[in-house]
Amino acid sequence: MQTNLEIVQSVNMVFAKGDIPSLLDMCSDDVEVVFCASEPTSIPWAGRRSGKAGVLEYFQLIGAAFDELQWKPSHYVGDGERIVAFGTIDMKVRATGDRRLAMGA
């Protein structure tokens, strides 16, 4: 049986390939995704989403905002139950064509 850390690492590899249907198949029915932001009203995907439908909505909102997006995890922190991935996000904003590089977790 895989540990939660191994599952999160596998999910990140599938995400890097852009295979959202396979990513959702890897998630439990009670999966949660949380995106924290200092100004959550200006970021449509900010907040907490639960269940596979919520995770799908999260990725659809991100997909609508960016022409390109690469998440490169650098390290993981967790207590066994909850895992946080830290890394960089390289993105091209669809509305402006601007490229952005950000650190994230």
Image (spheres, rainbow, N blue to C red):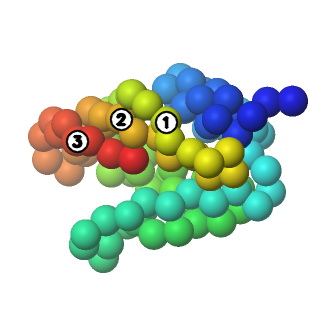
Identify the amino acid type marked 3: Ala
Q: Which residue bears the numbered disc 2?
A: 87
Q: Which residue bears the numbered disc 1?
A: 76
Distance between the alpha carbons at the discs numbered 2 and 1: 9 Å
Closer to viewer: mark 2 or mark 3: 2
- Secondary structure at badge 3 equals strand
Distance between the alpha carbons at the discs numbered 1 and 3: 17 Å
Distance between the alpha carbons at the discs numbered 2 and 3: 9 Å
Earlier along the polypeptide chain: callout 2 or callout 1? 1
Taking the image as drawn, is residue 11 in sight?
A: no
User: Looking at the image, which residue sits at the far right?
Assistant: 1
Residue 55, percent across and down? 61, 55
- Could you tell me if the residues under marks 2 and 3 are in contact, i.e. CB atoms within 8 Å? no
Look at 74% across and 45% down and name the residue there.
Answer: 27
Identify the amino acid type marked 2: Gly
Look at 65% across and 66% down and name the residue there.
Answer: 50
Please tell me the numbered disc located at residue 102.
Answer: 3
